[in-house]
Image (tube, helix red, strand yellow):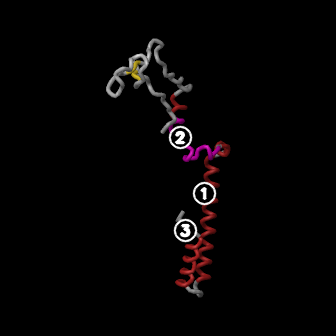
Amino acid sequence: MFDINGGEWLVLLLVAILVIGPERLPQYAEQLGVWARRARRFAKDARTRVDEELGEDVKDVDWSALDPRKYDPRRIVREALLDDEPPARPVTRPATARPTYRTGAGRPADAGAAGAAGPLVSPEPVAAPFDDEAT
């Protein structure tokens, strides 16, 4: 909450004891105890009132499922808009399409086009696989 570790609490306590003084320290400690009891009572009363006003239907709710840290907007939108998962689009090449090789500079002049290695050139662009879960 305040990012104060144990050592810092001890330093703050020591400074408070020195500033307040030993004669007024019991009064301040008693007042702090009264405030803590009031805060605890207030929280308990607030919880009781909320439970009474919401009724019996809310007592069965799994509040951990509504934790915003578990919120995945893609999943929620998918569940709300789509009945079923969309079918995966397979990446297909036409059966008649054969890879062709590009001839160009940097290859030996005696290498024929049939046995030469070169970069593949597809006759038509092929769609890359799509991952809808990727960020």
Helix, strand or loop under label 2: loop
Q: Amino acid at mark 2?
A: Asp
* Residue 77 in the image, given as x and y percentages of width and height: 51, 34
Residue 46 disc label: 1
Label 2: which residue?
72
Tell me which secondary structure the magenta stretch mostly adopts.
helix
* Residue 21 in the image, given as x and y percentages of width and height: 56, 86
* Residue 123 in the image, given as x and y percentages of width and height: 39, 18
Residue 64 is inside the magenta segment: yes
Residue most toward the bottom? 23
Label 3: which residue?
4
Q: Is residue 124 visible?
A: no
Structural distance between the alpha carbons of marks 2 and 3: 32 Å
Q: Nearer the viewer, mark 2 or mark 1?
A: 2
Structural distance between the alpha carbons of marks 2 and 1: 31 Å
Chain part drawn in magenta: 62-76
Q: Amino acid at mark 3?
A: Ile
Q: Nearer the viewer, residue 70 or 104?
A: 104
Residue 19 disc label: none
